Image: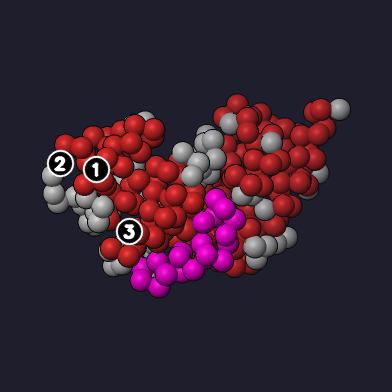
């Protein structure tokens, strides 16, 4: 669903986006064009959506909601610089709305501008300390900056929220894995699998962890489930740079998979 907010989950081509509306909505005509662009955005018709958002903004350049939505679409189309420009203008017009800060942070992450993204996420958290999206995304930024201890804390906060997503719980377990507490990481991953038996991320993580502990048979069993759900877990670059796994579980999984390739 595309409106004004994005939560990065990292499971499709590069990023999965969940869009939530800005508090500011279009208040002027042509409402039909605004709604058309919104529907195209929801349906993933990004090229047409970008064209219609731009047409709408030609007449209403100060509509913060439309700017933020177009920024989301531009990011989805691979234009993070254009996305940042739109989100920045939306912030200038409607500084009380937190969604464009979150959206801009995601675009900044796409350019590996970790410090800038961190500032935007921290601004959101300063105003709403329980914002799950900002907590989770900031955790990913801390991991990218190799601060896995802080990443673990942020993922734990996101995972403890009433609005927690399964990926936050998995990322918390992976950060614990990276920090060397394999028993706690395994416990959290197994709890996650019991609740979501078809969750590929947890199955792949358990495969890596079990292999590292010498339990090859159970590792292979869990990998068979993970591979059937999402084959991208075979790709080291995807794991590190798209899904954003920590290096230790990533290297363990790749080493485990290398056994099948000999």
Say which residue appears at 72% left-offset and 37% top-offset.
219
Say which residue appears at 59% left-offset and 68% top-offset.
150
Q: What stretch is highlighted in magenta?
A: 108-128
Q: Taking the image as drawn, is residue 18 in sight?
A: no
Query: What separation in Å lies between label 3 and label 2 (alpha carbons)?
Result: 19 Å
Looking at this view, name the residue that lies furthest to the front.
58
Q: Position of residue 23 (x, y in %)?
A: 24, 57
Mark 1 and mark 3 lie on one chain; the one further toward the N terminus is: 1
In the image, 14 versus 107, the foreground residue is 107
In the image, 122 versus 177, the foreground residue is 122
Mark 2 and mark 1 lie on one chain; the one further toward the N terminus is: 2
Dot 3 lies on which element? helix
Query: What separation in Å lies between label 1 and label 3 (alpha carbons)?
Result: 15 Å
Residue 30's label in the rendered image is 2
Look at mark 3 in the image and give the residue it sits on.
90
Residue 122, above or below 105 = below
Q: Where is residue 63 in the image (x, y as percent from the top left)?
A: 24, 54
Left or right of 94, for residue 75 = right
Q: Is residue 112 in the magenta section?
A: yes
Say which residue appears at 49% left-offset and 51% top-offset.
81
Residue 56's label in the rendered image is 1
Are dots 2 and 1 in contact, CB under 8 Å? yes
In the image, 21 versus 46, the foreground residue is 46
Mark 3 and mark 2 lie on one chain; the one further toward the N terminus is: 2
């Amino acid at each position: 669903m595309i409106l004004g907010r994005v939560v990065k989950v990292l499971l499709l081509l590069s990023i999965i986006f969940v869009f939530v509306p800005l508090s500011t909505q279009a208040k002027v005509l042509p409402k039909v064009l605004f709604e058309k662009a919104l529907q195209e955005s929801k349906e993933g018709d990004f090229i047409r959506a970008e064209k219609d958002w731009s047409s709408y903004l030609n007449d209403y350049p100060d509509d913060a909601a439309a700017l933020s939505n177009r920024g989301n679409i531009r990011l989805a189309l691979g234009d993070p610089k254009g996305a940042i420009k739109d989100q920045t203008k939306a912030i200038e017009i409607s500084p009380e709305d937190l969604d464009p800060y979150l959206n801009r942070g995601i675009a900044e992450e796409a350019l590996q501008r970790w410090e800038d993204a961190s500032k935007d996420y921290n601004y959101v958290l300063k105003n709403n300390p329980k914002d799950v999206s900002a907590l989770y995304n900031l955790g990913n930024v801390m991991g990218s900056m190799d601060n896995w201890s802080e990443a673990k804390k942020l993922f734990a906060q996101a995972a403890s929220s009433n609005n927690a997503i399964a990926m936050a719980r998995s990322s918390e377990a992976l950060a614990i894995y990276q920090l060397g507490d394999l028993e706690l990481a395994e416990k959290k991953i197994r709890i996650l699998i019991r609740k979501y038996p078809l969750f590929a991320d947890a199955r792949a993580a358990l495969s890596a962890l079990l292999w590292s502990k010498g339990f090859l048979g159970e590792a292979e069993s869990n990998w068979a489930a993970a591979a059937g759900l999402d084959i991208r877990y075979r790709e080291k670059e995807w794991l590190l740079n798209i899904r954003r796994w920590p290096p230790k579980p990533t290297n363990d999984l790749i080493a485990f998979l290398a056994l099948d390739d000999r």
